Image (spheres, rainbow, N blue to C red):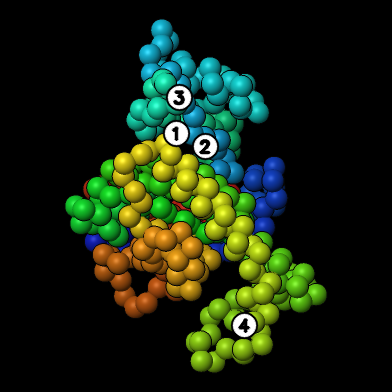
């Protein structure tokens, strides 16, 4: 949870609580609800959050997010075209869906032009569950945001020059179980994809490689990453790197495919940079991704232009929560939550 001053220039409060792993289809089990309510209550007690209003962020656990194309010219209104396409893709009736979409622009497919859309759909019962749980936790939902929008807001806040805002950026947000990949151009998303690679896959790879318990492998990897380079055990470093290399290669392969899709679909404006964030981001990984994709790259620093007291641990992990808080910067200061309704990303 993150709360900023009214103008978004100063950090008011910040707090994080780990939630138990969330299995697919287990977003709102009684145990999960209890953990969310307790986590929010503890953070409001321990950190100087003000008020009850909150922005809650939905990720791909609660949303269907897809790029798809519709004819540029059609007898049907665009909203009806979107609903017709979604009816074939949703695992529930389209009548139960809350739908939003972004018109990315016109793209050429063969000898015809189509409209490229990014569509977001959530089942209304899921949204009702989210509101109910957070109301029980003492929060009043002021808005629901989507993770890609918060990441875009965070990156645009970090890269504030006019030339940065007009350029195209590959955003890679590596979380606990998956990676959000976005191409951002002209302050809007051009591509959104979730890749099933995250911290738990790294932990599993280390556990299998070293024949360790999963928790022990996770602790070893965190301890190895947290220590200064000159204090790391070379043998441990080598083993961890060997174990995680196939997972990293899979991630880079997926990123390369996203770059190819972008270059074919949106011809003429090359990617200018890659920004790597999320709880698994570090400088070494950012440099590796940058080198393999042949793009200038860096680790995300979401609080670069926010006044804070002291250093923030794992700053790159806070992009989603900060982006949600920035949504409210022209209103009275609000508590903003980013991950409580789904798996941490």
The residue positioned 67% from the left and 53% from the top of the image is 22
Residue found at the far left of this picture = 162
Mark 2 and mark 4: span between their CA atoms?
Answer: 37 Å
Q: Where is residue 194 shown, x and y percent of the image?
A: 55, 47
Residue 180 position (above or below residue 209):
above
Mark 3 and mark 1: span between their CA atoms?
Answer: 20 Å
Mark 2 and mark 1: span between their CA atoms?
Answer: 7 Å
Can residue 127 be seen from the camera position used here? no
Residue 111 position (above or below residue 198):
above
The residue singled out by tag 4 in the image is: 237
Q: Say few, some or many: other residues with alpha carbon within 10 Å of mark 2 (under 14 / 14 to 19 / 20 or more).
A: many
Which of the two marks, 3 or 1, is nearer to us in this view?
Answer: 3
Which of the two marks, 2 or 4, is nearer to us in this view?
Answer: 4
The residue singled out by tag 1 in the image is: 118
The residue singled out by tag 3 in the image is: 110
The residue positioned 28% from the left and 43% from the top of the image is 186
Which of the two marks, 3 or 4, is nearer to us in this view?
Answer: 3
Q: Where is residue 283 shown, x and y percent of the image?
A: 45, 73
């Amino acid at each position: 949870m993150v709360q900023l001053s009214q103008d978004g220039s100063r950090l008011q409060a910040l707090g994080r609580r780990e939630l138990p792993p969330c299995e697919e289809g287990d977003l709102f089990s009684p145990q999960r609800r209890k953990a969310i309510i307790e986590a929010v209550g503890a953070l409001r007690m321990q950190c100087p959050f003000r008020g009850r209003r909150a922005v809650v962020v939905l990720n791909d656990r609660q949303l269907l997010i897809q790029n798809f194309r519709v004819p540029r010219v059609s007898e049907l209104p665009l909203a009806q075209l979107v609903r017709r396409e979604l009816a074939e893709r949703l695992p529930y009736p389209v009548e139960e869906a809350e739908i939003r979409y972004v018109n990315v622009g016109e793209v050429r497919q063969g000898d015809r032009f189509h409209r490229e859309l990014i569509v977001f759909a959530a089942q209304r019962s899921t949204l009702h569950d989210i509101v109910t749980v957070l109301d029980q936790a003492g929060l009043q939902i002021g808005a629901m945001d989507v993770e890609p929008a918060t990441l875009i807001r965070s990156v645009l806040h970090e890269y504030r020059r006019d030339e940065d805002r007009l350029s195209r950026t590959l955003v890679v947000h590596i979380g606990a179980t998956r990676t959000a990949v976005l191409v951002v151009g002209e302050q809007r998303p051009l591509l959104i994809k979730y890749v099933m690679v995250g911290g738990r896959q790294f932990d599993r790879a280390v556990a299998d490689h070293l024949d360790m318990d999963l928790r022990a492998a996770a602790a070893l990897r965190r301890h190895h990453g947290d220590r200064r380079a000159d204090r790391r055990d070379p043998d441990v470093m080598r083993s961890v790197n060997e174990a995680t290399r196939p997972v990293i290669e899979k991630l880079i392969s997926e990123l390369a495919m996203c770059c190819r899709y972008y270059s074919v679909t949106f011809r003429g404006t090359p990617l200018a940079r890659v920004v790597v964030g999320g709880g698994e981001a570090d400088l070494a990984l950012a440099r590796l991704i940058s080198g393999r994709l042949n793009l200038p790259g860096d680790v995300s620093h979401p609080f670069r232009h926010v006044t804070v007291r002291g250093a923030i641990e794992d700053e790159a992990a806070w992009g989603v929560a900060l982006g949600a808080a920035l949504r409210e910067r022209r209103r009275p200061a609000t508590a903003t939550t980013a991950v409580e309704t789904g798996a941490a990303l």
